[in-house]
């Protein structure tokens, strides 16, 4: 998929989340979300912080390298500390800040020379992959906000980006958990929101993952526990992957508890 297409879907995903938070009263931004210790303000602040970091990676690689060194000194808390600081902004100011940073990031990604990859906290990424990662995080944090506000979102075809990223980062999830990635590709077959069939990998693979695209994305972003989802594995390696799957960079997450959203 081309960068412009992914950026258009990222814009739509951001706009949907903007609608959820844009009309909140100031005290609504203090609503706790399923992420321990995080309010709605923290969720948006995290997006701001990461958009700014991605913008830096796209525009000033040397400065971003310095950021990476700082992050390595406190890998489990560096990003959260930055987001927590941004979350102290007044809600109206935080919302404007987020709107500005996502526009600036889109412009910066478009300006990256063809074939160039961006440094990141995980493996280097192309501008298109970076935009996909930003869409994934926007969707995931949007899920936390929706859960906090008691809102059920309608899934869209934009979930394909999230699922694609989860499949592409399979080996990264293994490495994060100090495990050796399998040598063979898996087959992943998912049912999209409108009945589409989305698939990755060889059809005749021994290791297979099937189920709902929405549920697969909720699992890959660790927004639901696997016991509560329609995602199935065939094969021991596929089973292992679903236990450690992680579409986002950073240390392994804690995920959610079974039945937390029943």
Image: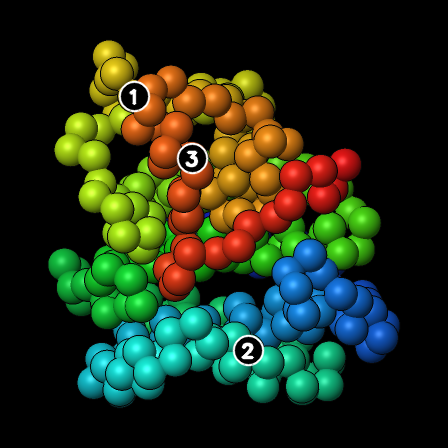
**Residue tagged by mark 3?**
242
Q: Nearer the viewer, mark 3 or mark 2?
A: 3
Judging by the rendered image, the residue that carries numbered circle 1 is 207
Closest to the observer, 246 or 126: 246
CA distance for labels 3 and 1: 12 Å
Residue denoted by label 2: 83
Count neighbours of disc 3 (C-alpha within 10 A) and say few if under 14, some if 14 to 19, many if 20 or more: some
For the point 77% across and 72% down, the residue is 29
Left of 186 or right of it: where is 166?
right
218 sits to left or right of 206: right
Quick check: 76 above or below 164? below
| Mark 2 element type | helix
Q: Mark 3: which secondary structure?
A: helix
Q: Residue 73, located in which quarter of the rendered image? A: bottom left
- Give the vertical position of 196 relative to 182 (above or below): above
Contact? badges 3 and 1 (CB < 8 Å): no
């Amino acid at each position: 998929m081309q960068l412009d297409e992914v950026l258009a879907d990222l814009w739509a995903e951001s706009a949907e989340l903007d609608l959820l938070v844009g009309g909140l009263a100031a005290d609504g931004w203090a609503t706790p979300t399923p992420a321990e210790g995080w309010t709605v303000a923290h969720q948006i602040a995290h997006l701001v912080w990461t958009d700014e970091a991605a913008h830096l990676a796209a525009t000033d690689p040397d400065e971003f390298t310095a950021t990476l060194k700082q992050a390595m000194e406190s890998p489990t808390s560096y990003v959260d500390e930055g987001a927590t600081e941004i979350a102290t902004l007044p809600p109206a100011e935080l919302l404007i800040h987020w709107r500005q940073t996502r526009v600036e990031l889109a412009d910066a990604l478009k300006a990256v020379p063809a074939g160039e990859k961006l440094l990141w906290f995980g493996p280097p990424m192309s501008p298109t992959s970076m935009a996909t990662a930003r869409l994934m995080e926007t969707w995931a944090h949007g899920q936390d906000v929706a859960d906090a506000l008691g809102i059920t979102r309608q899934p869209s075809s934009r979930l394909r980006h999230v699922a694609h990223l989860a499949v592409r980062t399979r080996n990264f999830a293994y490495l994060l958990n100090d495990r050796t990635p399998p040598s063979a590709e898996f087959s992943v077959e998912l049912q999209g929101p409108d009945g589409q069939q989305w698939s990755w990998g060889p059809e005749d693979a021994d290791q297979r993952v099937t189920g709902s695209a929405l549920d697969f994305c909720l699992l890959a972003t660790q927004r639901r526990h696997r016991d509560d989802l329609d995602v199935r594995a065939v094969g021991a390696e596929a089973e292992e992957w679903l236990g450690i799957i992680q579409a986002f960079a950073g240390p392994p997450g804690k995920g959610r508890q079974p039945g937390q959203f029943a």
